[in-house]
Image: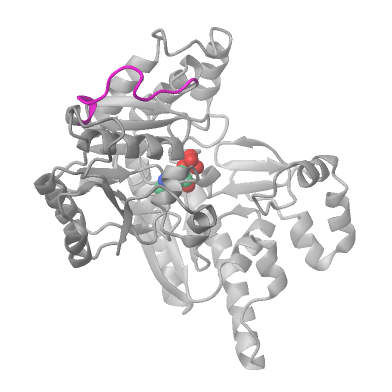
């Protein structure tokens, strides 16, 4: 399985050089249907992926890709993992959905395991990351609301401090605490009472904190923002101020949590815990599941009817999630994440010494960012052509989120192919410098979005 098959041109990359191949892909009815009938919320590559095995995915022409994107941090166990396939097959024949008006066989045990992993006390299951975020914001407002306050009155303690450069999702609550303006401003007025703090700027945090704050929310490692970890000083100060003012510290670990850093949670490298932890992406091994993990103090204000969901925590999905967590434990994947992550990082640092447009390598375990001084999109397109799935976030940061099961050989394969991608970019960049043109082609740029 090691060898990455020599690439056949994909439609979009082919369109740069081979209009005939491009038109073949554009006559694929599945792509035509998608282009005609889907809301155009994504600039999708004209590739139809049909299946995956381990750390590889395959497109409809049979081309094989090494997956270092992992469904954007979802596929912790890669694709078609035997334990997940077996569990889902078994459970789908038993009960896909029951109802939260009754217990099912897996929701309680899954909550127990998440509590053990995180050190939190209580769990609420949602259907996505953004829904977990919205639920957490509601819990923060509820926690801070004086008991007995008139139902229509706004609690004085209602402000939420969020971070600049953050991303928390697409629902109204989540966009309200997402700093990136293009995700938030088109939907104004968003949820009121949110103020942004410069990430890792202790003085800015201190200047905005007072007893009207009910919560401070941060990604322990900012993902979409370009893989920026929270500093220990910032975390400690956020924890101390939240405690001092009776506010909640909310850690969004939707992208970086559940093992990806080589610890169960990224905040476990610090000496203190948050009050609420949010998880989603890899939780149910590719099935949609998010969760709010909360302290007993937060749970104390919750009563039946205050929050809920129809689908969250169904038996099929919770069985898959429990199997995911047990597989991480049984297969000692945290060790693999740390070891492969260290090899990957070392290899990237060697490449950074060779290519002067690599500015920095950031992250931990298997959440790594390679910040470039040139546009990253053409590199993503070139990698795709060479059978490698990666992603670029914030225009200049190549983001790597491989499955937790990635092997040493696959890390080596990645570094080999990535080096050829970088060498190609270096050639284009130096040609552009000689001719005085922009260092990236508009075409390639569009192709990778
Ligand atoms: C840190 C973080 N929070 C929240 C979300 C939203 O999660 P979802 O897309 O499952 O709603 C994401 C998604 O990328 C994320 O990376």
Q: Nearer the viewer, residue 413 or 187?
A: 187
Count up the numbered dots.
0
Residue 303 screen position, x and y as percent: 28, 19
- Is residue 25 or residue 189 the one in the foreground? 189
Q: Residue at x 63, y 68 (%)?
A: 378
User: In the picture provided, is 51 more to the left or to the right than 407?
Assistant: right
Q: Position of residue 268 (x, y in %)?
A: 22, 43
Front residue (pair 240, 22): 240
Query: For ligand 1, which image quadrant applies?
Result: top left
Tell me if residue 301 is in the magenta stretch. Answer: yes
Work out whether 146 lies above or below 423: above
Residue 281 can be seen in this image = no
Residue at image location 52% in from the left, 44% down from the top: 70
Residue 4 is left or right of residue 271, and the answer is: right
Q: Inspect this view and state whether residue 434 appears.
A: yes
Q: Residue furthest left?
A: 244
Residue 208 is a magenta residue: no
Q: Image quarter for residue 231?
A: bottom left
Q: Is residue 244 left or right of residue 341?
A: left
Residue 317, position in %: x, y? 48, 21
Residue 158 against residue 388 in the figure, above or below: above
Of the 4 image quadrants, the one containing the C terminus is bottom right
Residue at screen point 79% across, 67% down: 16
Q: Is residue 69 left or right of residue 246?
A: right
Q: Position of residue 243 (x, y in %)?
A: 12, 45
Which is more toward the observer, 143 or 162? Answer: 143
Task: Name the dominant secondary structure of the magenta segment.
Answer: loop
Above or below residue 34? Residue 445 is: below
Which quadrant is home to the N terminus?
A: top right
Q: Which residues are magenta?
A: 298-310
């Amino acid at each position: 399985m090691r060898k990455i098959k020599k690439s056949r041109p994909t439609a979009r990359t082919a369109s740069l050089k081979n209009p005939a191949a491009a038109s073949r892909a554009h006559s694929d009815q599945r792509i035509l249907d998608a282009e005609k009938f889907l809301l155009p919320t994504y600039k999708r590559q004209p590739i139809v992926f049909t299946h995956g095995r381990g750390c590889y995915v395959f497109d409809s022409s049979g081309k094989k890709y090494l997956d270092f994107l992992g469904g954007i941090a979802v596929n912790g166990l890669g694709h078609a993992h035997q334990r997940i396939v077996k569990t889902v097959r078994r459970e789908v024949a038993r009960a896909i959905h029951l109802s939260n008006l009754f217990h099912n066989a897996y929701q309680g045990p899954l909550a127990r395991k998440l509590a053990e992993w995180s050190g939190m006390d209580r769990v609420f299951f949602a259907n996505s990351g953004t829904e977990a975020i919205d639920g957490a914001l509601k819990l923060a407002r509820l926690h801070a609301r004086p008991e007995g306050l008139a139902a229509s009155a706004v609690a004085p303690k209602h402000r939420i401090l969020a971070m600049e450069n953050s991303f928390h999702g697409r629902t109204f609550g989540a966009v309200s605490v997402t700093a990136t303006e293009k995700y938030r401003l088109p939907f104004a007025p968003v949820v009121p009472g949110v103020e942004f703090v410069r990430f890792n700027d202790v003085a800015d945090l201190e200047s905005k904190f007072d007893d009207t704050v009910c919560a401070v929310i941060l990604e322990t490692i900012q993902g979409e923002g370009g893989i920026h970890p929270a500093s220990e000083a910032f975390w400690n100060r956020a924890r101390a101020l939240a405690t001092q003012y009776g506010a909640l510290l909310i850690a969004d670990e939707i992208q970086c949590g559940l093992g990806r850093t080589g610890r169960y949670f990224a905040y476990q490298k610090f000496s203190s815990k948050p009050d609420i932890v949010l998880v989603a992406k890899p939780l149910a091994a590719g099935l949609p599941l998010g969760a709010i993990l909360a302290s007993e103090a937060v749970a104390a204000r919750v009563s039946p009817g205050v929050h809920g969901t129809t689908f969250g925590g169904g038996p099929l999905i919770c069985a898959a999630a429990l199997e995911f967590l047990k597989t991480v434990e049984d297969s000692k994947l945290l060790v693999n994440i740390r070891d492969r992550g260290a090899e990957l990082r070392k290899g990237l640092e060697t490449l950074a010494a060779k290519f002067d447009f690599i500015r920095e390598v950031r992250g931990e375990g298997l959440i790594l960012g390679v910040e470039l001084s040139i546009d990253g999109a053409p590199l993503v397109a070139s990698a795709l052509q060479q059978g490698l799935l990666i992603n670029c976030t914030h225009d200049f940061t190549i983001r790597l989120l491989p499955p937790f099961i990635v092997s040493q050989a696959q890390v080596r394969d990645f570094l080999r192919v990535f080096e050829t991608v970088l060498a190609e970019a270096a050639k284009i960049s130096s040609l552009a410098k000689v001719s005085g043109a922009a260092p990236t082609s508009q075409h390639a740029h569009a192709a990778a979005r």
